[in-house]
Amino acid sequence: MNRREFIKTGSAAAAATTFGACATAKGADKLAILGGTPVMGNESLPALREMFAWPIVNDAMRKASDDVLVSRKMSGRDIAIEFEKRFAEWNGTKYALCTPNGTSALNAAYYAVGVKPGDEVICPSITMWASCSGAVNLGATVVFCDVKADDLTIDPKSFEAHISPRTKAVVVVHYMGAPCDMDEIMRIARKHGIKVIEDVSHAQGGLYKGRKLGTIGDCGAMSLMSGKSFAIGEAGMFVTDDEQLYKRFVRWGMYIRIRQVWGPGAIQRTLDVPFGGVKLRLNQCVCAIGLEQLKKYDRECAEIEKAMLYYWKGISDVKGLKIIYPKWEKSNKAGWYSSRGLYDPAAFGGLSNKVFMAALSKEIPTGFAGSGCNFPLHLSSVYDDEDIFSNGQPPCRRGLKPGVSPKSLWGRLPVAESINDRLLGDPWFRHYDTAIIDRYIEAVHKVAANYKELLKLPESKTPHSFWPV
């Protein structure tokens, strides 16, 4: 759809008014980064902050947290157990266990699936370090694989190419809300007898062909911290249908529940000491907030989805920008956490995405999410030659022949090494307010129409402005 067709559509009636000065989108106005008038100035900040404020806090969430404080039950179990029960019902899994953060949930998940010293765990290079730190802590070697250029999720072909007889598990990351190709991942994993951990930290409640993410692999783990889509504070969640994985997870760090889940006979020698030596109990103020968030989360995600698809429809005529969205029916991006679109520098005369984003950020004072994504983890020495535990040997080299570097196991990962230059952040709208969204659409058209003027600007030497947690 070109710009003229977009303005004519009924869904863009408000946009027609906003774009009354259509010459702006055609490049008549000077870019704000070059001294021109911005599409929206600082006077718009109060309205824009409301557009992007997250999570959406209501009175029920406040009261739920206050009630826990008044009852002095912050370190109890009853509300946590209720939250786990409701979360499991909502997510479609038999078991759910809440933890203090997503990292701890992922760490324990590796123990649950049986990762041990000398094993290999495959992980996409583009993700946060928490996706694979648990494997390192257990003495396994992390073998990185590449991601797909069209959606940044794990490349099934690269995954299979990196399998060895030592491969125990793979962690698949539904990155920036985009679901992985789980049918292909599961086919490969089952063929080779590999456990599948879904990292759902970016896509809680997301769907792959009608199935909730986190329910397809052997287990799922995710962050529920305040910046994520399902935001309740610093928290995490582990989900599975496998009773043995559930019991091993409890044995790792749920010390108060060990006797309840395993039975008194199983702990006559160990008593209630957790095998992981960690305590995974979640503060019940957060659990109470989570119970209230469950009541409204799907509705909020639906509005976010509507707003984001409206935005991308509005800029669909801009050559060089492309939406990242699942191609399968009954699939979505749930909350669109830190979503990115594809950016083609060649369409803008070689202009870097950092300069393009800098220009957008001058047109509207807040909302555009920056360029790039996580740095490629396989370039970090942590997973190759750092003696993390000061025992004379890097943990990731355990089980390898002397002189063999983990780097030789993954080789070059071309997409991961170049993808940061080919992304552009979406404005993460939390409300379907077309009058505001239209101004962001206008800003994109204005910068795209005037990109040649930006070719004169030096590229910033700073890293891409993105660091998800």
Image (cartoon, rainbow, N blue to C red):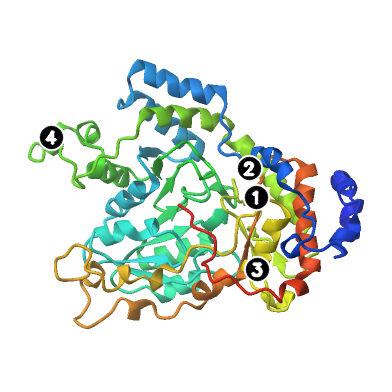
Please determine whether, in this image, residue 365 is positioned above or below residue 455: above
Q: Are there few (<14), some (14-19), or many (20+) residues within 10 Å of tag 1?
A: some
Horizontal arrangement in the rendering, residue 80 relative to residue 176 (left or right): left
Q: Which residue is label 3 attached to? A: 355
Q: Which residue is label 4 attached to? A: 265
| Disc with the residue nearer the chain's start (2 vs 1) | 2
Residue type for callout 4: Gly
Closest to the observer: 411 or 198?
Answer: 411
Asked whether the residues under the numbered discs 4 and 1 touch, taking CB atoms below 8 Å apart as contact, a structural biologist would say no
Measured in 3D between alpha carbons, the distance from the residue under mark 4 to the one under mark 2, in whole angstroms, is: 52 Å
**Mark 3 against mark 2, which lies toward the viewer?**
3
Q: Residue at (52%, 40%) from the top-left corner?
A: 230
Residue 276: assigned label: none
**Which quadrant of the figure has residue 99?**
top left
Residue type for callout 2: Phe
Asked whether the residues under the numbered discs 1 and 3 touch, taking CB atoms below 8 Å apart as contact, a structural biologist would say no
| Disc with the residue nearer the chain's start (1 vs 3) | 3
Q: Residue at (90%, 49%) from the top-left corner?
A: 16
Residue type for callout 1: Gly
Residue type for callout 3: Val
Please determine whether, in this image, residue 136 is positioned above or below residue 305: below
Q: Which residue is situated farthest in the left direction here?
A: 269
Label 3 sits on a secondary structure element that is helix
Asked whether the residues under the numbered discs 2 and 1 touch, taking CB atoms below 8 Å apart as contact, a structural biologist would say yes
Asked whether the residues under the numbered discs 4 and 2 touch, taking CB atoms below 8 Å apart as contact, a structural biologist would say no
Measured in 3D between alpha carbons, the distance from the residue under mark 3 to the one under mark 4, in whole angstroms, is: 64 Å
Label 1 sits on a secondary structure element that is loop
Q: Which residue is label 2 attached to? A: 52
| Disc with the residue nearer the chain's start (4 vs 2) | 2
Measured in 3D between alpha carbons, the distance from the residue under mark 3 to the one under mark 2, in whole angstroms, is: 23 Å
Q: Which residue is label 1 attached to? A: 367
